[in-house]
Image (cartoon, rainbow, N blue to C red):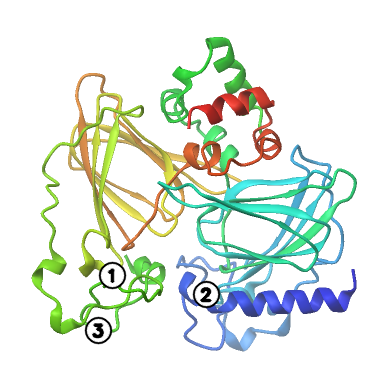
Amino acid sequence: MASFISFLLLAALIGMASWQAIAAEPSPLQDFCVADLNSAVRVNGFACKNPTNVSADDFFKAAMLDKPRDTVVNKVGSNITLINVMEIPGLNTLGISIVRVDYAPLGLNPPHTHPRATEIFTVLEGTLYVGFVTSNPDNKLFSKVLNKGDVFVFPKGLIHFQFNLDPHKPAVATSAISSQNPGIITIANAVFRSNPPISDDILAKAFQRNLMASSSFSFLLVAALLGLASWKAIASDPSPLQDFCVADLNSPVRVNGFVCKNPMNASADDFFKAAMLDKPRDTNNKVGSNVTLVNVLQLPGLNTLGISIARLDFAPLGLNPPHTHPRATEIFTVLEGTLYVGFVTSNPDNRLLSKVLNKGDVFVFPEGLIHFQFNPNPHRPAVAIAALSSQNPGVITIANAVFGSNPPISDDILMKAFQVDKKIIDLLQAQF
């Protein structure tokens, strides 16, 4: 490809992504804050290098993003070259990274999320089929075939993928990502290869394994899958610029969040809901749990205030299956019973951090990370309350989004992502 064209594409991408970066990352309070990667001081991001010791090299890397990468070293046939703050210390506090993605013929960048970033993506060579899946309850698949020069946006925290349709020619793309350290969570790896593993009981209920054909099928499925390789709320939601901005839910004007109701017409009822969060909910469903969320749609006074609340009811052995909140951190406390909870960190570690919680205990699930809650007691129910750092946190249940999207994600993509055959994919999709 022509180096001049590549330069123009990269420059355009960086310019398009940079406006959102301010919302995603700590905002710079000076011209720059070059990361001191050797500092013992721990902050959100990195401590600043002494500015008198800064040079142009702190903002430069001979990254060779014009050079093809090896796509035959892995099962999925793709290779990602990420240039983030670890490679260019000058990116600290600037809220942006850049990526080159190489695809073999029929290569796949499998379903994944970036917990801290939106991605804007353009094709440099070849043709790619791309898409993302919205959060519950719709799990709607937005997909498109992209040709050279086309641009597509993957919203922050949503599951997305790219697939090279051509069986003979490779493809190349580049992305700008609105974080100095966007993180990546490959769904198959995080769910089925966490360290230590997520409990079989949790995965069986989340993916409804008990409804599948036979124990031999279950064994084959597990074997194949295992063979796979509150200031934050200000960043997530629009910040209030006055005492309140009660949502006008009937306004035809579309903004990020909701337009404000005339403050002269606001009343205490805009900040109140008789939500009956003290009352047990029905947990008679496949997973044995029920989430009652009170967000801006139920309580219009929450608009711009960056918080919601939820009650969670668990039947004996009930599960809130692996899911993410693309726009919120969750702080969670047990009101009754005992719960086994955990979250999985992003690639490459996919580390499971889990804990058994008793009544009164508190646990935090960081924004965008896959997490779950499970009642291990076979005789007694459990209840919890959670606060979430967004007026509309969203929820993406992993099994539903991957195997129950509308329209379905292509079998070819899921077969390669999970390294199983079409029969197993079809049986999983039938559960959702």
Amino acid type of the residue tagged 2 in the rendering: Gln
Q: Earlier in the sequence, mark 1 or mark 3?
A: 3
Q: Is any atom of residue 60 visible in this view?
A: no
Q: Position of residue 272 (x, y in %)?
A: 12, 62
- For residue 64, side relative to residue 54 (left or right): right
Q: Position of residue 49 (x, y in %)?
A: 57, 78
Q: Position of residue 334 (x, y in %)?
A: 21, 41
Residue on which the image places disc 3: 242
Give the number of the disc on residue 20. Answer: 2
Q: Residue 218: name its quadrant.
A: top right
Amino acid type of the residue tagged 3 in the rendering: Gln
Quarter that holds the N terminus: bottom right
Give the number of the disc on residue 44. Answer: none
Q: Earlier in the sequence, mark 2 or mark 1?
A: 2
Element assignment for label 3: loop
Measured Cα–Cα span from mark 1 to mark 3: 21 Å
- For residue 257, side relative to residue 207 (left or right): left
- For residue 257, side relative to residue 277 (left or right): right
Residue in the picture at 56% in, 67% down: 179
Measured Cα–Cα span from mark 2 to mark 3: 22 Å
Is there a contact, CB below 8 Å, between mark 2 and mark 1?
Answer: no
Residue in the picture at 69% in, 84% down: 55
Residue on which the image places disc 1: 250
Q: Earlier in the sequence, mark 2 or mark 3?
A: 2
